[in-house]
Image (cartoon, helix red, strand yellow):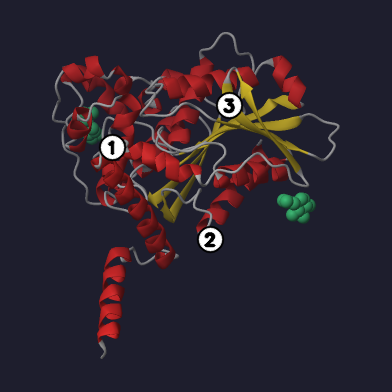
Amino acid sequence: MGRKSLYLLILGVLVAYYVYIPLPDNFEEPWRMMLTNAHLNTIGHLANFVQLLGISNSMDSFKIFMSFLEVSPTSDENVTVTDTTFNNIPVRVFMPKRKSEALRRGLFYIHGGGWCLGSAALQHYDLLSRWTADRLDAVVISTNYRLAPQYHFPIQFEDVYNALRWFLRTKVLAQYGVDPERIAVSGDSAGGNLAAAVTQQLLDDPDVKVKLKIQSLIYPALQPLDVDSPSYRENSHFPLLSRSSMVRFWREYFTTDPSLEKAMLSNQHVPVESHHLLKFVNWSSLLPERYIKGHVYKNPIYGSSEIAVKYPGLFDVRAAPLLADDKKLRSLPLTYVITCQYDVLRDDGLMYVTRLRDAGVPVIHKHIENGFHGAFSFLEFKISHRLINDYISWLHENL
Ligand SMILES: *[C@@H]1O[C@H](CO)[C@@H](O)[C@H](O)[C@H]1NC(C)=O
Ligand SMILES: *[C@@H]1O[C@H](CO)[C@@H](O)[C@H](O)[C@H]1NC(C)=O
């Protein structure tokens, strides 16, 4: 073997070592996942390196990388796409081009990205809204909101809520030709968190007369109090969203102070004063048995009382919709929930499904056995198209 082939062999082994990750047997496109993961990790390493050099925060570098994936608002043969603002919040509007005598469905979409990343202009969100508008013959509003680490809770929530309230005004609905009785709110991941939160908030808002017909929550984040549930344990190193990244996103949502992240990683961040909230996130009683498997519920180790004072958002329903009481949940609209087996957030969704059903809310729950967090957004995977088709068909029948 020549020296050149030896070098090539070593390089090959190193690349394989860098790319290879063990994945479950039922995983559909393992190599695609390994490459996607390696790609994201490389961006992550570069971002950390830039932070190490003191040039910029790693989250900001991530934002710059992501901005290359944005597309301008471009109409196609079926859908007119424009950027505008609702109550000063930038939104992207997708209007079907075909003539319609009747009022249309309205769908308000909230993108994911851990409250730190993403926008309505990201190519996959743009495509999703385009497909939804076309296939449902719906007016789709895809909202933006200000992001962490520059902005913290409740800014993200308030931006989304203000844009939604603007949309739900009689005058605006009429202007877009939207039927006030056929409106849904949808979101994925952090957007699912915001969707659940604004849907709850609307119930108590005397100024909004319109009632949502549907909320769709796609692998939503719903609570930061227990980050040691079976799904957090089982998927703590799963590609695309590890436990430590999810904890980092939660922390960034509330504060730039890294000490909260440390307390959360050891799951010792709930002070004894907030003990009464733990029943709402108690997976031991809220998860169906088949998801608990052999996991043993540990009684909480309480954190410092200062936490509730410094980061009240952790215990606020606008950040943690799972903390709402049953009385509040009872009035929620028909709910569509997607949970994925390979997702730290799986149990957040499952617990919400249990709590909503117990409160008498009609819930359509799709659990995807070989699904993973991000499956809705990474369009290069086959599973992504199956999930999106299912979601749009369901909305077609129910909205
Ligand atoms: C527009 O709608 C037609 C008919 O449904 C479809 O065949 C075509 O692919 C659509 N175009 C785009 C760009 O989606
Ligand atoms: C959680 O639920 C289990 C079983 O239902 C119960 O034994 C435990 O005390 C609960 N813990 C909290 C903090 O609610």
Q: Position of residue 34 (x, y in %)?
A: 37, 62
Asked whether residue 329 appears in the rendered view, the answer is: no
Q: Is residue 333 above or below residue 283?
A: above
Q: Position of residue 187 (x, y in %)?
A: 51, 36
Q: Secondary structure at mark 1?
A: helix
Marks 3 and 1: which is nearer the front?
A: 3
Q: Secondary structure at mark 2?
A: helix
Residue on which the image places disc 2: 382
Sequence-earlier tag: 3 or 1: 3
Q: Nearer the viewer, residue 117 or 302?
A: 117
Which residue is located at x 28 percent, y 45 percent?
48
How many tags in the picture?
Answer: 3
| Type of the residue with mark 1 | Val
Q: Secondary structure at mark 3?
A: strand
- Numbered circle sitting on residue 262: none
Q: Quadrant of residue 36?
A: bottom left
Which quarter of the figure is the N terminus placed in?
bottom left
Residue on which the image places disc 3: 90
Q: As drawn, which residue projects farthest toward the top?
A: 206
Beta carbon of the mark 2 residue lies under 8 A of ligand 1:
no
- Numbered circle sitting on residue 247: 1
Disc 3 to disc 1: CB gap under 8 Å: no
Q: Position of residue 298 (x, y in %)?
A: 16, 38
Q: What distance separates the C-alpha of mark 3 from that of mark 1?
A: 28 Å
| Type of the residue with mark 3 | Pro
